Image: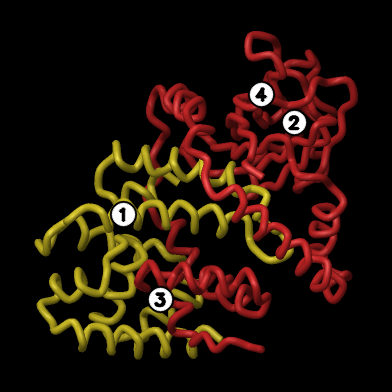
Chain colours: A red, B yellow
Amino acid sequence: MTTQVPDTLLDEVALGLAPDEDIRRVEELALADPSIAARLERARLRFLPLDDTAPEMPLPDGFWDRLRAQLDQAPARAANVVNLADRRLRRWRMTAMGGMAAAATLAAMLGWSLLQSPDPSVVAVLLDAEGEAVALIEGQPDNTTRVTLLERPDLPAGRVMQVWTKPDADGLPVSLGLLVAGRSDTLTVPGLPEPDASQLYEITAEPEGGSPTDLPTGPILGKGLAKKPVI
Amino acid sequence: MLGVARRMLRRSDLAEDAVQDALVLIWRRAHQYDPERGHARGWIFTILRNRCLTMLRHEDRGETTDPADERAVDDAFDRLPQSLDLRACLDGLEPETRRAILSSYVLGHSHGEIAGRMDAPLGSVKSWLRRGLVKLRECLT
C-alpha cells in the first residue's frame, strides 16, 4: 500500500536537483498519499527561508499591463482540464477522509471552509511594490471573498487592512470589508456583480473602522488582477 | 518573487516572464491549493521555482563560473538569520557540500552544472550531495 520514497529524493525534489520525471512522479505520489505529501511539504519548508534571502526587486513599470495582456491570451493555452478535474476529485476524497483527524486545528478549519465553499469564480495573487506575494484572493460568484495572507503585513499603528475590488474596470473601487484581526479571513458583501477575470483586487492600510471616504485612501499593501481558474 | 527569479535566471527580463508565468499557473491551479496540506507561501514559491527551473533547463548556461553566481550563493547564506536552524546546520557541512546544496536551490544548478563548476566527477558530486542532505536532515530534526 505504501510507496517507498526515500527522504533524500524528497530533498532533491525540493531543491530542484531531481530529474523532471522524478519530480513529476513524486508530485503524483504526493497527490495520492497524504503522508508523502506531508514529507514533501516538510522538505520544501526546510529550504523556504532561502527564498527570503533573494534581493528585493521592485516591480518594473508596465508589469501589470503586460500581465493583463498575457491573461487575455491565457484561456487559449489552457490544458489538462480533464486531468485537473480528476486530481481535484482525488483531493476532495482525501480531504474528506484526512480532515477528520485534524479537526481541532486551524488548518482543519480552513480545510472545512474549503469543503464548504464551491470552487472560486476568480483567484488573484496580490503583490506588494517589491513584487512579493502578500495575499491570495479567492472570489465566489456571490462575492464571498476568501483572503489568505501570505505575509504578516507591516501595518502602521492604528491602521487596519481593507480589501477592495473594482467590479467595473473604469469604475470606482468597492470595499469588500476589513481584515479586523489582521489575519486571513473570509469576507461577504451582498449586491455586487459576480467577479470576473481581470478584475482588480487590492488591500490598503486604512484608519481604524475603514476608509472614511469609502474609497482607498491609505498606502497599497498589495494588488493584483483576478483570473478564472481552469476547473 | 522577482528577486528569487532574477537570482536563478540572472536576467531581469526573463525573471519578469517567470513571475508572470507563475502567476498565471497559480491562477490556474488555485483549486488544487489546499490550506490543510500546505503552506500558501511555500506553494507559490514552489510554482515559481519550478517555472524558473524549466526555463533554465531549456537554456545552456555553459560551465563557466560566474563571479556573480558565487556572490549570490554567499549572500544567500549570509542573509539567513543567525537564529535559524537551517543556517546552523548548513554551517556544520563541509564548505563544498554547503556550496553545492545552496547552488542547487538558489541558482537552480543541476548535478552536472555543479560538477562542471567544481571541476569534480559527476558521480562524486552526486554522492557527497546525498551525504550532505542526510546530514542536513539529521541536524534539522
* Residue bearing the label numbered 2: A162
Q: Residue A12: give its label.
A: 3
Q: Are marks 3 and 1 on the same chain?
A: no
**Does the rendering let one see residue B19?**
yes
Seen in the picture, residue A208 relative to B102 is either above or below; the reply is above
Classify mark 3: helix, strand or loop. Answer: helix
The chain holding disc 2 is A
> Disc number at residue A73?
none
In the image, what residue type sits under mark 3? Glu
Image quadrant occupied by the C terminus of chain A:
top right
Expressed as whole percent of the image width and height from the top left, the position of residue A20 reads 38, 67
Residue B101 in percent (x, y) is at 33, 74
Label whose residue precedes the other's in the sequence (4 or 2)? 2
Question: Same chain, marks 3 and 4?
Answer: yes
Q: Chain of mark 4?
A: A
Q: To which quarter of the image does residue A109 belong?
A: bottom right
Q: Secondary structure at mark 1?
A: helix
Please report contact status of discs 4 and 2: CB closer than 8 Å, yes or no: yes
Q: Residue furthest top?
A: A170
Whether pointer 2 and pointer 3 mark residues with C-beta atoms closer than 8 Å, the reply is: no
